Amino acid sequence: MAARFAKNETRDFERLIIPNYMEKLTGNSPLITDSLCERILCVEESYSIWFNLLLNWNIERQRYWYPLESCERSDVEAFQDSYFETEVGAEKLRTILRNYGVQTVWEMRENDRNCELELLAFEPDYNGAEGYFCDENFDWIIYASHENSITIGGWLLTEIQRDWVNWKERVWTTPLLD
């Protein structure tokens, strides 16, 4: 009987195995990995995106962000990730983003495993590394942390709050809530 993996376990497994396999075959690290939906960002692209995250959201590379650190913006809110996942979910999130013309998303990780994802492959989650998600406009942000929180900012927050009737009951207060 074949081993069964949860979706995130499979994705993490592929992220580890496929690039190593391709590197052994070619002697080079691939620019496209995991699937045809992901492109690993080069160092220059990553630095440029981190710089824009600092300018637009006051997010520093390899640092925590809201709710773990303070944030002066009024268009940012952190939620318990388990409630967000079950009551909003990645598909609803992708639909909202698609309706605003978003086609690709940058996934920036504290471990510098940064990539550009096609929207259909986008699932904001904590995978062992803090994750920041945005697009080229830097007018919305998602932050997935190790504290069971998911932070939403910019116009995306307004859209999520519009459809998520009980969002006020799901605001992050502590990592021990679940």
Image: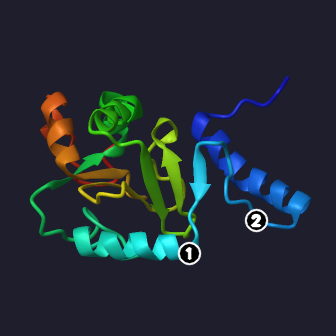
Residue in the foreground of this view, choosing between 139 and 13? 139
x, y percent for residue 163: 18, 28
Q: Check disc 1: other Cα within 10 Å, few if <14, some if 14-19, many if 20+.
A: few
Residue type at mark 2 is: Ser
Direction from residue 37 to residue 31 in the image, left or right:
right
Residue depicted at 45% across the width and 40% down the height: 119
- Read off the residue under disc 1: 43
Query: Looking at the image, which residue is at 42% across and 74% down?
Result: 48
Residue lying at the far right of the rendered structure: 25
How far across and how far down the image is residue 82, in percent? 37, 39
**Does residue 3 appear in the picture of this structure?**
yes
Left or right? Give the position of 29 relative to 164: right
Query: Compared with residue 1, is residue 32 higher up or lower down, i.e. above or below?
Result: below
Quarter of the picture containing the C terminus is top left
Q: Is residue 163 above or below residue 102?
A: above
- Percent position (x, y) of residue 8? 58, 41
Evaluate if marks 1 and 2 touch, with contact meaning CB atoms under 8 Å apart. no
The single residue placed furthest to the left in the displayed view is 74
**Residue 29's disc number:** 2
